[in-house]
Image (cartoon, rainbow, N blue to C red):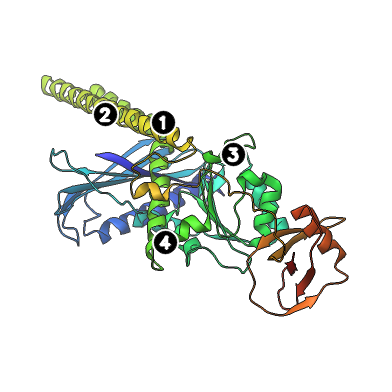
Amino acid sequence: MQKVAAYLLERRDGMDDAAARSTETERTREAILAWLKSKGADPGSPAGSFEPVDGGHGTFAIESAQDGPLAWWMVRLSEQAPAGRCFATSVSVTTTERSVAVYAALEAGADTTQISPLYVDPRCPHVVRSLLGLAGSWYHGASRLDGLLRVAGFDAGERLAERIGDPDRTVPIVVVSEDYSGRVALADIDDRLAYDLAGLANVHRVDFDAAWGLTDSLGRVFTCFNGAVRVYWPGWAVTDHPLAHPRWTVERLQGLGDDGTQPRDRFRRKLRTLLMRTAALSVVRPRQIDAIRSAEARRVFTEMRANAASLEDYQQLAETYAEDNDRLRADLEAHQEKLKELETTVANLELRLRYAERPQQPPGTTDVDDLEPDAEEEAEQPAPQRGEVRFYKKLYSAPTHDILTAVQDCGCNRWENANKAEKAKKGVAKLEGRDDWQSIQHCAKCTGGGMWKVRW
């Protein structure tokens, strides 16, 4: 079995009071038990089996430990599919001095030893979605976990840039940008990504003006506009290599398939897998868990030793001690196996990084390689030719001129002469490095900064 995803959800607001932590712990456990019951298991038993709705066989176990006001409680559910694949989901609730933390992990593997491809397409567990749906704010480290956020306007884009550059940020920010007409590259891709990445990343949909506010703050090499999608990992810095924060342009996204849903679903699977694998390697379970379980084991062992009054009691004590040793030995072996898996993963990532640093992809790329983010910025647009018609959209105003960018025809056909548009003319001249156009017109219908048609 290999871990394919991990989640950490923390309640912090209003958790300074012991009674509030107790109430929140109970509410969280009830939501997890409701999920367990929906699987067909009996939540009133500490362990048992059940029959999954899609066939196969399932088992579950509930464990707990207490150390004064600190508590740990976990449900582990394993399902064996008819096709021979195995899936395990463990969800624990840890009550600490100032918070209530939920740690969930997904594992996948096969139930037989066989060297053959094993396709796994993990999704956000229903239990995680149920917990995120409870009233109140969840955090992962210093960052609050939000649903889909919409960012509109240049100033809002600058504020988003501040969040991206926050050194204390602990979750990725995924930016889905709109083009100048307000559309995204793939239908509903922002909603779908927010659904897929719940609990793993905060997804923001930015309009055209906000995207330029983002660019103005982060710099062009870290831009995300005109339908592009980009992942900004925690720890972003202006000195980072642009490839460290992958971006997919609208051309790359729309070129993933021929129909409306295939490219969207392929990209969703790509990004979901990327975020889940990253979380599996980097999300750390609450460190208090080991301390609570160790304290519980010491307490039980001390009570048994104090109450031992006969040879049979001491024999039971020795058996308990041996069982604990066996469990610790099994845990050690599991950690050693996990270390080997991580070493293999690191080696694969290093290989992929070497390929990503090359100017071109290596020959023989697979279907998955087609989904790799852009390795280079777009080529600079060539200078306008005599008789060529170009269109420009105003982004915002500088003191002496307008800031514009080249776009596609808006299709409005409401062009009017712009004899007095001095700031716009200066903006075109600054962008193209020349002012020898034949005519310049303004669209009377477009809003949001203005659209200009220039015949060179």
Residue holding disc 2: 337
Horizontally, residue 297 falls left or right of residue 180, namely left
Q: Is residue 412 above or below residue 44?
A: below
Q: Amino acid at mark 4?
A: Arg
Nearer-the-camera pick, 166 or 42: 166
Residue holding disc 1: 350
Looking at this view, name the residue that lies furthest to the left: 312
* Structural distance between the alpha carbons of marks 3 and 1: 20 Å
Q: Is residue 378 above or below residue 181?
A: above
- Image x and y of residue 228, in percent: 55, 56
| Residue shown at the point (21%, 60%) measured from the top left | 40
| Residue shown at the point (71%, 58%) measured from the top left | 154
Q: Amino acid at mark 3?
A: Trp
- Image x and y of residue 5, in percent: 36, 44
Mark nearer the N terminus (3 vs 1): 3
Give the number of the mark in front: 3 or 4: 4
Q: Amino acid at mark 2?
A: Glu
Query: Which element type, helix, strand or loop, lies under badge 4?
Result: helix
The N terminus, quarter of image: top left
The C terminus, quarter of image: bottom right
